[in-house]
Image (cartoon, rainbow, N blue to C red):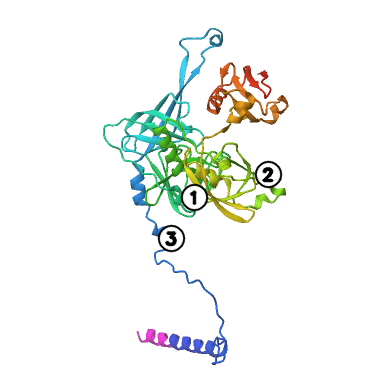
Amino acid sequence: MKKIGSLFLVALFAGGITLLAYKVFFETSKYAIVDSNAQGVVFNTSTTPTSARGSGINEVDFTVAAENTVNAVVHVKNVTKGRSVRSPWDFLYGSGDSNQRAQVGSGSGVIISSDGYIVTNNHVVAKSDQLQVTLNNNKSYNAELVGSDPNTDIALLKIETEGQLPYLAFGDSDNTKIGEWVLAVGNPFNLTSTVTAGIVSAKARDLGRNQSFIQTDAAVNPGNSGGALVNTNGDLVGINTAISSQTGSYVGYSFAVPSNIARKIVEDIMEYGSIQKGILGVNAVNVNSPYAIENGIDEIEGVYISNIEEGSGAEEAELREGDVIKKVDNITVRKFPDLTGYLSTKRPNDKVEVTIDRAGDLLTVPVTLKERQVVILPIMEFTVKNLSEKDKKRFNTKKGVKITAVPESYRNYGLVGKVLLSLDGDEINNIDEARSLFSGISRYGKTVITMIDEKGERERLIFQ
């Protein structure tokens, strides 16, 4: 024991000597002498207050919004019956017992009223023979298609239930802000509702449809179409519609129809049975076109008016070619989708305040929106307009639509400026009738159009 104690003292003594030698002979002193005249270095730092709870995401509570949403989101199944031929003889003689093979598509929907009205995407329910809706509690019901709008990709369904249903209230999508947290809630593959989170990445995105979408990075996959995009309060701010992907699966970008547009479409279907669209009556220059680049229009913030439609609210309000639209009501207009997105929430005879830049002067002009007077016809893609009173006198006709533009392939037929009277013998009175008739054209059959010119001469053209 004595021996161990001696060894411990020797080791302690040796360590002390070693430490002393290092301090004296090897360690470099690191200190500075500062007198009263020394100038210190000043650093500018942010004075933004920081949160003791974290960097943002920890402060957001998604649970309330999720709880309020999942039971209002449903699974939508679309059954389309297709005829499959059993033998080559069926082509010649037909077959009464040929198989009817059902094709099943699916998506999501959002309950918007306690009595069973459901909003979803038009592409989820298009061409359906039977629609079935499954709630988050796994109860299933047959659904009726009340109406739809392919242009905005919105459809309205109705189911009949025993009791009242949980539903979501429309929020104001104009108040959503870039960077705001949102939840994407869908019911894909009938697996009950699923929730993903993200932020609003951009607003007024144009996907080539003259439409205005909310862009988000919340994960949305096939089957989520028609589901809800909600803010952290649980307000419905969008209907999830599309993803941008080369693989067909989510890769970081998803898009939703703003709730203000969806709500207006639903109200039109329920109240009028058709979509009521208020038209301003201006055409804009494509900012990416050579003309825009050559004239510096591509750098303008706003919508540059290239043409005013005859008989439109814009013409009556004396808007001019070259005016730049900067604002509509309280909505700032930086690009064309900002304008079309806001006007999509309006109806004919609604009044809007349009702020324009005219040669450097800002003017605010009241404009009354009107019904659409111009439309591009399906299949043949003629641009036609309703006849004005001047047109009716000039062409001596009360019926028909005036052709104002045609695609390149029809340019040599001399169609522009003539009045289209009928298609395959069916009379045309306005652009709605023209659009309906042209949508039924077969790409493989014969099409006959009848026109009249300013001299009153009728002309029939046959397109094979």
Kindly state the secondary structure of the residue where label 3 is placed. loop
Q: Position of residue 68 (x, y in %)?
A: 33, 46
The residue carrying mark 1 is: 329
For the stretch drawn in magenta, the main secondary structure is helix
**Label 1 packing within 10 angstroms: few (<14), some (14-19), many (20+):** some
Q: In screen coordinates, is 231 left or right of 411?
A: left
Q: Position of residue 419 (x, y in %)?
A: 63, 25
Query: Considering only vertical position in the picture, is 87 above or below 63?
Result: above
The outermost residue toward the left is: 163
Residue drawn at (46%, 49%) of the image: 174
Residue 442 appears anywhere in the view = no
Instruction: Give, as a single range, the part of the protein colored magenta.
Output: 1-9
Instruction: Give the label, 1 or 3, closer to the camera.
Output: 1
User: Which quadrant holds residue 71?
Assistant: top left
Q: In screen coordinates, is 193 left or right of 154?
A: left
Q: Position of residue 272 (x, y in %)?
A: 42, 32
Per the model, the C-alpha gap separating discs 1 and 3 is 33 Å
Asked whether the beta carbons under mark 1 and mark 2 sit within 8 Å of each other, the answer is no
The residue carrying mark 3 is: 56
Residue drawn at (37%, 51%) of the image: 233
The residue carrying mark 2 is: 289
**Label 2 packing within 10 angstroms: few (<14), some (14-19), many (20+):** few
Residue drawn at (53%, 34%) of the image: 372
Q: Earlier in the sequence, mark 1 or mark 3?
A: 3
Q: Does residue 375 belong to the magenta stretch?
A: no
Looking at the rendered structure, the kind of residue marked 3 is: Gly
Kindly state the secondary structure of the residue where label 2 is placed. loop
Asked whether the beta carbons under mark 2 and mark 3 sit within 8 Å of each other, the answer is no
Looking at the rendered structure, the kind of residue marked 2 is: Ser
Q: Nearer the viewer, residue 23 or 122?
A: 122
Q: Earlier in the sequence, mark 1 or mark 2?
A: 2
